[in-house]
C-alpha cells in the first residue's frame, strides 16, 4: 500500500466512523423521543397519521436497529433494518406531503448511512465488489 493510499484509506475510515456514530446518536435520540412520547413527536407523528400508540413500537424497533448498527459485527444487519425503517418514513412523508414534511430527508439519510458504513467496512466493500 502506498503512502497516499494509506492516508486516503485512513481518512475514509475515520470519516466513516465519525458519520456512523453521529447517525447512531441521532437515531438513539429519535428512538428515545418516541419511547417517552415527547409532545413534539406526538404532534408531528399525528400529522403524518401515526397514532401515539404506535410510537413505542417504532421507538423500540429504531433503538434495536441503531444498537445493531453501532456494533461492528452486526452493523450490516442494523443498516438493513434502518433502511427498512427509513423506507417506511419516506413513504409516509411522501403520502402526507400536503402536511409539508420533506420526504427526501429519509432517503438522503439512508444514502449517507450506507456511505458511512462503506467507508469503514472492508466486509461491505468485499460484498459489493464481489470478492471472496
Image (cartoon, grey):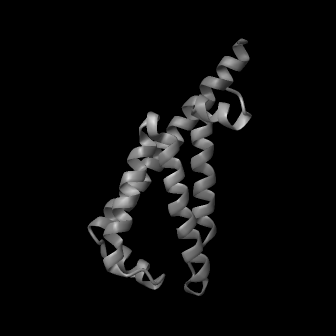
* Residue 101: quarter of image: bottom right
Rendered-image quadrant of the C terminus: top right
Residue depicted at x 55% and y 85%: 99
Question: Residue 73 at x, y = what percent?
Answer: 45, 34
Residue depicted at x 62% and y 31%: 12
Q: Is 36 on the left-hand or right-hand side of 6? A: left
In the depicted structure, whether residue 63 falls above or below residue 99: above
Q: Residue furthest bottom?
A: 98
In the depicted structure, whether residue 92 falls above or below residue 131: below
In the depicted structure, whether residue 37 falls above or below residue 107: below
* Residue 28: quarter of image: bottom left
Residue depicted at x 37% and y 73%: 41
Q: Is 47 on the left-hand or right-hand side of 117? A: left
Question: Residue 57 at x, y = what percent?
Answer: 34, 67
Q: Residue furthest front?
A: 132
Q: Is 98 on the left-hand or right-hand side of 131? A: left
Residue depicted at x 54% and y 62%: 86
Amino acid at each position: 500500500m502506498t503512502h497516499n493510499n494509506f492516508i486516503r484509506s485512513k481518512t475514509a475510515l475515520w470519516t466513516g466512523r465519525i458519520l456512523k456514530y453521529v447517525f447512531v446518536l441521532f437515531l438513539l435520540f429519535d428512538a428515545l423521543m418516541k419511547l417517552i412520547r415527547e409532545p413534539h413527536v406526538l404532534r408531528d407523528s399525528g400529522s403524518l397519521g401515526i397514532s401515539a400508540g404506535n410510537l413505542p413500537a417504532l421507538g423500540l424497533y429504531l433503538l434495536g436497529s441503531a444498537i445493531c448498527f453501532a456494533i461492528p459485527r452486526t452493523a450490516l444487519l442494523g443498516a438493513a433494518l434502518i433502511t427498512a425503517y427509513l423506507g417506511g418514513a419516506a413513504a409516509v412523508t411522501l403520502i402526507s406531503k400536503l402536511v409539508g414534511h420533506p420526504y427526501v430527508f429519509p432517503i438522503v439519510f439512508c444514502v449517507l448511512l450506507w456511505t458511512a458504513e462503506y467507508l469503514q467496512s472492508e466486509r461491505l466493500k468485499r460484498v459489493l465488489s464481489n470478492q471472496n
